[in-house]
Image: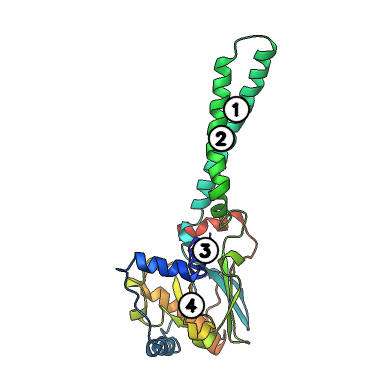
């Protein structure tokens, strides 16, 4: 499910007129800018050691001398909900259509035999109407949400390459596509407690690049790995990534490697993390 990333991309590509109209309608929202000196402070903090016990909680898909590839994306623990809701609508529409088709068959039989068919006609139209009421809005508005999750491996990937000193974010085209970012411009919520969410709970590791480093007019915000239970987990995850990129994999605990194959249960395991 790429719901958060999808919304962020839609906001980024909104026409200028639409963004200005939104600002006028929401004048009470304060937009605090980040100064260049603060950007430099965040990046400088990310270059320092965060802790003495680096550890990746994963999932990690590739790990060797040159590449570290991990799961990325926000709201991983909510993934599966869109599939469940979509299947509920699809199965309900299909079930009502099946009843309606069965009723139409009985209706033809009654008409051909000259028997009363008013009640059967009403029931057939009733179930056909329910099926259409569910199916038509879903096809018009719901299908675009379903494709964010169903029939995909449903995980964004982020690849750290030591050789090129670049970070590659793999997203679908409708979420911004593949983005290449410089390692030397990264800042992290795991580098210092003042950059992390309160307590570090319930949020994955957050990596950010300011527009100075993205080459665009907007920053890049990326969430990596599992949601943390405390700030120490954010620190350990970040230190693992930092040491890999700056010093190499020597001395780091080898993480468990997860298969790229989209096993069905991998779509729901984040909900139990």
Q: At numbered mark 2, what does the secondary structure look like: helix, strand or loop?
A: helix
Image quarter (top left, top right, bottom left or bottom right) of the C terminus: bottom left
Q: Residue furthest right?
A: 112
> Could you tell me which secondary element the residue under label 4 belongs to?
loop
Horizontal and vertical percent position of residue 96? 56, 32
User: Which label sits on residue 240?
Assistant: none
Do callouts 4 and 2 mark residues in contact (Cβ within 8 Å)? no
Q: Nearer the viewer, mark 3 or mark 4?
A: 4
Residue 101 in the figure: left or right of residue 72: right
Q: Residue at x 54, y 54 (%)?
A: 145
Measured in 3D between alpha carbons, the distance from the residue under mark 4 to the one under mark 2, in whole angstroms, is 44 Å
The 10 Å Cα crowd at callout 4, few under 14, some 14 to 19, many 20 or more, is few
Q: Which residue is mark 1?
A: 100
Q: Residue furthest top?
A: 114
Q: Is residue 55 above or below residue 128?
A: below
Residue 216 showing in the rendered view: yes
Q: Secondary structure at mark 3?
A: helix
Q: Position of residue 104 (x, y in %)?
A: 64, 23
Mark 4 vs mark 1: in front: 4
Camera-side residue of 71 and 172 = 172
Q: Name the residue carrying label 4.
A: 218
């Amino acid at each position: 499910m790429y719901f958060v990333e999808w919304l962020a991309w839609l906001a980024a590509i909104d026409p200028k007129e639409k963004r200005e109209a939104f600002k006028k309608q929401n004048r009470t929202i304060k937009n605090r800018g980040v100064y260049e000196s603060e950007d430099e402070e965040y990046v400088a903090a990310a270059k320092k050691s965060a802790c003495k016990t680096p550890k990746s909680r994963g999932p990690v898909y590739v790990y060797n001398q040159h590449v570290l590839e991990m799961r990325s994306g926000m709201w991983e623990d909510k993934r599966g909900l869109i599939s469940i809701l979509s299947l509920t609508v699809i199965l309900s529409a299909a079930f009502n259509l099946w009843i309606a088709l069965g009723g139409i068959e009985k209706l033809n039989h009654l008409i051909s035999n000259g028997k009363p068919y008013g009640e059967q006609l009403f029931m057939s139209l009733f179930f056909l109407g329910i099926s259409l009421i569910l199916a038509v809005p879903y096809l018009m508005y719901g299908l675009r949400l379903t494709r964010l999750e169903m029939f995909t491996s449903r995980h964004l990937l982020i690849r750290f390459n030591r050789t090129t000193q670049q970070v590659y974010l793999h997203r679908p085209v409708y979420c911004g596509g593949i983005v290449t970012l410089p390692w030397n411009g990264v800042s992290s919520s795991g580098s210092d407690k003042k950059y992390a969410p309160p307590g570090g709970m319930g949020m994955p590791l957050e990596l950010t690049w300011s527009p100075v480093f993205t080459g665009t007019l907007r920053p890049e915000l990326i969430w990596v790995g599992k949601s943390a239970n405390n700030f120490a987990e954010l620190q350990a995850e970040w230190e693992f990534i930092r040491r890999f990129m700056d010093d190499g994999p020597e001395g780091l605990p080898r993480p468990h490697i997860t298969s790229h194959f989209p096993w069905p249960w991998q779509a729901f395991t984040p909900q139990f993390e």
